[in-house]
Image (cartoon, grey):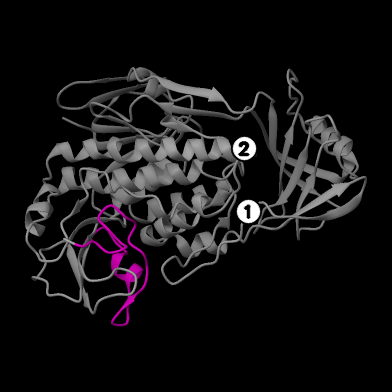
Amino acid sequence: MSDTPVLIVGAGPTGLTLGIDLARRGVQALVVEREEGLFPGSRGKGLQPRTMEVFDDIGVLDAVRAGGGRYPVGMLWRDGKRLGEHHLADPVETTEEAPYEGWMVPQWRTQRILRDRLEELGGTIAFGREVTDVTQDEDGVTARFAAGPPLRARYLVAADGGRSAVRRAAGTGMTGEAVDPLPMLVADVRVSGLDRDWWHMFPPREGRDEFLTLCPLAGTDDFQLVARFAEGTRVDLSPDAVRRVVAARTHLAAEDVTEVLWASEFRPRAALADRFRAGRVFLAGDAAHVHSPAGGQGLNTSVQDAYNLGWKLGAVLSDGADPSLLDSYEEERRAVAADMLGLSTRIHRGEARRGAATLQLDLGYRDSSLSAETRTEPGPVRAGDRAPDGRVDGVRLFDAFRGPHWTLLALGTDAPGPPAGVRLVRGPSHRTYGTGLFLVRPDGYVGWAGDTPDGLGAYLSLTGTR
């Protein structure tokens, strides 16, 4: 007997996104968090366009837009004088097929928005529940806590961060490397005497590595401070020490830092879990992959882990899909995480720039066992690809995709009446998709594509949709 079908360990963006996705499918899930509240800092502040598409689908896009803003352009300083602009990324324009730009929202606010959506859907978070051990058998998983009774679940998802207790309890290793040996400080501060129009950057003196940046956080009165220190430095996180660092590296005085709201030390590293599934335990987010913050890939890759896993758990638990469907989670997401880790590391080391690759719009699953391309002459959008936005006979595709269902696009060809759980959109051959039948998964990727309906029913039966 299970206390809950799914136990999600960790109330960060990963765990909350997964909880939302399951709740809207009618799957009961309990999110447990070892801390007494949500994460208080701005750390993962950058949302990539693909994550904005996910947030559109799960119903939080308007709140995210209202709670953040565009990335500011960098401004370089030296000796109290402005040296000129510094563009962190290559410009990328939005299009009808990819309508969202990158957006800056402090992580604490993103998590509050996700929490509110989870609670709106009837989901719950139990704070102050620290998992200390996990065991499993053929029927389920038992989680034990530092305080309180154990909990039993059919499946458990570890979204408890880079030092995941669940990952260790499940016996899964993690292989990685230091991306940068120099310690770094990240803090949320309030500052007087500095405008909020720029991402203020104070590069190091020649021969030194100790830079500092102050980025205004849209929708707040705060700045995110990032500072790097010489190797071997013990970073002092006290408010007075943070003020001294600002005074030493900028034209500002210590007293110009009027408030230090949160501070943390970190050392950039890249690490990948040896597996993303151990029986009934799944790893997601930082529990599965740890990134350098350069390029803004960590939180975004994590949210999309949850988005990939959510519909599959729902299909198995609610729709009667074969549990082997869950094997595709590791198959699809571990390869993506490995690619994003490499990109983050290259950007951190100055070997690549932020650009189209960091938007995560071109990621896909063409080689996945869930991708079935049956057309004799496939067009530009193939099985395994992200399904672009656009319009078909006046219907916006993202509006049609929104929700926990599948969508069948019949473009320039006939289509059978779809089964329950599949929304049909008919139209002429499309300038982006071309001609054919495109079965779009609940997570916005083309699962099956064909010239005729032959094979469509068999594919749907594998996912519990009949």
x and y, in percent, of residue 261 in the image = 70, 41
Q: Quadrant of residue 68?
A: bottom right
Instruction: Say which label, 2 or 1, has the lower sequence index.
Output: 1
Residue 126 seen anywhere in this rendered image of the structure = no
Q: Which residues are magenta?
A: 377-406
Q: Is residue 380 highlighted in magenta? A: yes
Q: Amino acid at mark 2?
A: His
Within-10-Å neighbours for mark 2: few <14, some 14–19, many 20+:
some
The residue lying toward the viewer, choosing from 287 and 173, is 173
Q: Main secondary structure of the magenta part?
A: loop
Instruction: Give the number of marks.
Output: 2
Determine whether, in the image, residue 195 is placed left or right of residue 11: right
Determine whether, in the image, residue 249 is placed left or right of residue 292: right
Residue pointed to by mark 2: 348
Q: Is residue 141 above or below residue 396?
A: above
Residue at image point 23% right, 26% down? 279
Q: Is residue 397 highlighted in magenta? A: yes
Residue at image point 76% right, 61% down? 197
Determine whether, in the image, residue 187 is placed left or right of residue 410: right
Q: How far is mark 2 from mark 1, CA to CA?
A: 13 Å
Q: Is residue 308 above or below residue 61?
A: above
Residue pointed to by mark 1: 89
The residue lying toward the viewer, choosing from 100 and 106, is 100
